[in-house]
Image (tube, rainbow, N blue to C red):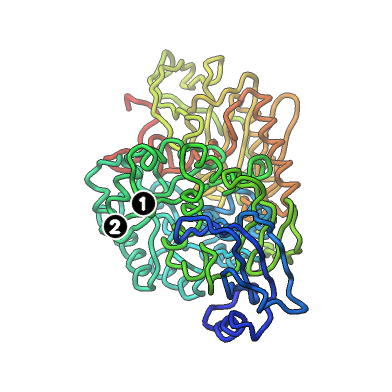
Amino acid sequence: MNVFRKPLADCVPELVATARGEKAATLVIKNASLVNVCSGEILRGMNIGVQGSRIAYVGKTIDHMVGERTQVIDAAGAYAAPGLLDGHCHIESTQLTVTEFARAVLPLGTTGGFFDAHEIANVFGLKGIRHMLEEARTTPLAAYMQVASCVPSAGSEFETAGAALGPEEVAEAFGWGHDVIALGEVMNFPGVVYGDEKMIGEIQATLRAGRVADGHFTWPADDWRLPVYAAAGVTGDHECVTPEDVIERVRLGMYAKMRRGSAWHDVAETIKAHTESGLDTRRMMLVTDDRSSESLRDEGHMNFVLRHAIAQGVKPVTAFQMATINTAERFGVARDVGSITPGSFADIILLDGNLADVNVAMTIAAGRVAAENGRMTVSLPGYEYPDEVLHSVHVSKPAVPDDFIIHAPIESGTVRTRVIEVRENHVETAERVVSLPVSGHRLAVGGGDGLCKIAVIERHKGTGGRSVGVVSNIGFHKPAAIAMTVAHDSHNLLVIGNSDELMAQAANAVVAIQGGVAVVTGEGRTEFPLRIAGLMSTEPFETVAEQSAAISKALYDAGCTMNYAFMTLSLLALVVIPTLRLSDRGLVRISPEGIRIVSLFCDE
């Protein structure tokens, strides 16, 4: 149980006594312009009375519950809105621990979220999720955890993960508490549609536990299989990139999640389902999925997403609904979070200036002032991860340049080769076919053709599994390489470069620091240690943001100028998003026909 948040049933006597005026409120906010997301209106001159972690009273009169020890805040007419909720986020993708994530986002107005810990689950299974849950419970965040549904994301025949979860593990996790809220994004959507026993069993375990299932459907919006997916009980989906994606999901009774992460910018298009097609927004949500520590520092979190949605033509109060009450209702916890109403948790933000600016001046979380003027006002205890989590990178041997040789089916000439084409600010890739030169049975890549090699090396069990492919649009204009253990979703060791020598150096550097990122050029090496499962840093938020920015600069200096390039590159091993990816098992194609491993060479 979260140490800051008591169940409503335990609070009823004190809340009622406070609302009557027989017990002094612990906190009172006077003269606020209340953003009422339930009614969709702004109410001026409103007062809010808080008892402990929950709201006891909302109304015009408040003096009857002010005592000698009541903390009184005069809002002076400023807007008071519900704390913002992120409806789909992987904390690990910020490279921060839960504690440091809380320190980063509370000053930005985020007071809670629905966190799918499938990154650490792919490394440590249920143990990883449990660690993050226990840490989350020590923070003021209304942190709801989801149970990873796809570990590995698409089956062991396509990739090697560090763990495997199935229906029994899903059922077990739901027994940990009410804050284990849902089944995480069901990325193996073909498995659901075609009756895979494991996937169907996980959804059944979820429904029997009274929880909801989140989706991840990347086939076209008009594909006949979307209703099949919905029939399985999947009621929310963040893989919306067009207005049609949103429209079809909402028409089927699903919640459509529109994301504005660091490197994928889908809100501008998807929000047209409301601004141009006129659909009701009650089943639309704004989410991040995800934002790096660097972009949290430089741009913001859900406050940034709201501001962006409003700039697309969404009315401010509607945008707030899409990041508060809609999200809470989707997960069945609107009694606790998502609105400023009696009985709810006192998660409140006070805003400077215009509502559309979403300029957060103060954040109140679970009835306590947690941040003011961009700075935390409370300290958080932190969490100690065990040694096995800090030493999770196990490769069979050090990398050498020869590991990155691609052997061609001919001795010389040219061969038609499948290339992974990266798309800036998009999660999907394209499949491109290029005729590349061969000499001595070796494929020549990176000799001024703008292409790079990409390799995935198994790092969980030291099996020695490895595959090498070709990728375009990286942009390196000089010899360079990047290696990382942040390689969604199995998080093996991903290496990209145009020099076999530098690729080996980068890979070995990441192994030496037991997880993280390394960029190597002829001028030197830039490292970003991520020792917690090879995904998260042990350092404070400020340090992590600086190290993340250093990686971005190193990539930029080498010619990779993509927006938040690291976030995009980390997805190139994610074998459930179209169209072409690489895993330790080989080149994987994702299409409406399903998922399958294909040859690097077209004529084989």
In the picture, the quarter occupied by the N terminus is: bottom right
Residue that label 2 marks: 196
Instruction: Choose between 367 and 59: the one closer to the eye.
Output: 59
Q: Earlier in the sequence, mark 2 or mark 1?
A: 1
Percent x, y of residue 460: 56, 53
Residue that label 1 marks: 188
Q: Residue at x 61, y 48 (%)?
A: 94
Q: Is residue 278 above or below residue 364?
A: above
Tag 1's secondary structure?
loop
Quarter of the rendering containing residue 366:
bottom right
In the picture, the quarter occupied by the C terminus is: top left
Quarter of the rendering containing residue 68:
bottom right
Is residue 396 in sight in this rendering?
Answer: no
Q: Residue furthest left?
A: 224
The amino acid type found where label 2 is placed reads Asp
Describe residue 22's horizontal placement relative to residue 285 as left or right. Answer: right
Percent x, y of residue 489: 49, 48
Q: Is residue 369 above or below residue 5?
A: above
